Image (tube, grey):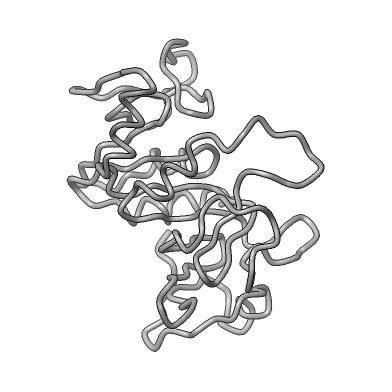
Amino acid sequence: MTDREIIARRIAKEFKSGMIINLGIGMPTASANYIPDGVDVILQTENGGLKFGAAPKKGESDPDLGNAGGEPITMLPGASAFDLSTSFTIIRGGHVDMTVLGALEVDQEGNIANWKIPGRFVPGMGGAMDLLVGAKKVVVALAHTNKGGESKILKKCTLPLSAAKAVNLIITEKAVMEVTSKGLVLKEIAPGLSVEEVVKATDADLIIAEDIKEMEI
């Protein structure tokens, strides 16, 4: 199982029936393929769609149906498509129960940087700033370390922020961490890893939960 699949599967464990959930570009969108049996959620894509499902099988995609990252999607019975202004009315109006976004960095205070690396051209922040303040719960999904093995879970973000103190939960291939008023709490660790290994791979200060669990994937 790849790190991407581990993260996507664990994201889907946060889905609860009745939720309206926005999935951001990248690993978050892959979680649509792992919605637990019996869980009925309404997935939203910021480019203008409600109630999409798993990715279509090869040869069955519709070129007119795609998520915010341009990946093909399936629309479920009762689904709707609409313009960007309607989509962001839903987001800014506080109607999104949870958003799952990728990130370049996140820190123990719940700050998130997911749009710009100084010196590199980027088209803009996109809808991240609206989702980070408009959604009721913010989940960040990212690789635990960068390609050089350096932690992306920091004491303090170094890149330009998308939002301050907006993150509630962090999911990586190694662990699940909750941002609380007391600090960053290590709640779950991936199978085969020890608490010590996760702590060593993490720059942020971690509070170890008394009832720490193994990640369900």
Q: Nearer the viewer, residue 203 or 143?
A: 203
Q: Is residue 23 left or right of residue 190?
A: left
Residue drawn at point x = 58 percent, y = 61 percent: 106
Q: Residue furthest bottom?
A: 210
Give the total of numbered labels: 0
Task: Answer above or below: position of 217 versus 5.
Answer: below
The x and y percentages for residue 213 are 40, 77
Task: Answer above or below: position of 145 versus 131.
Answer: below
Q: Quadrant of residue 121?
A: top right
Residue drawn at point x = 28 percent, y = 34 percent: 90
Q: Residue furthest top?
A: 63
Q: Is residue 178 left or right of residue 119?
A: left
Quadrant holding the C terminus = bottom left
Q: Is residue 104 left or right of residue 71?
A: right
Q: Nearer the viewer, residue 46 or 166?
A: 166
Residue drawn at point x = 20 percent, y = 42 percent: 40
The x and y percentages for residue 83 are 35, 18
Residue drawn at point x = 68 percent, y = 44 percent: 116
The x and y percentages for residue 163 are 51, 54
Q: Nearer the viewer, residue 188 or 208?
A: 208
The x and y percentages for residue 43 are 31, 36
Task: Answer above or below: position of 11 versus 120.
Answer: below
Q: Is residue 24 left or right of residue 202?
A: left
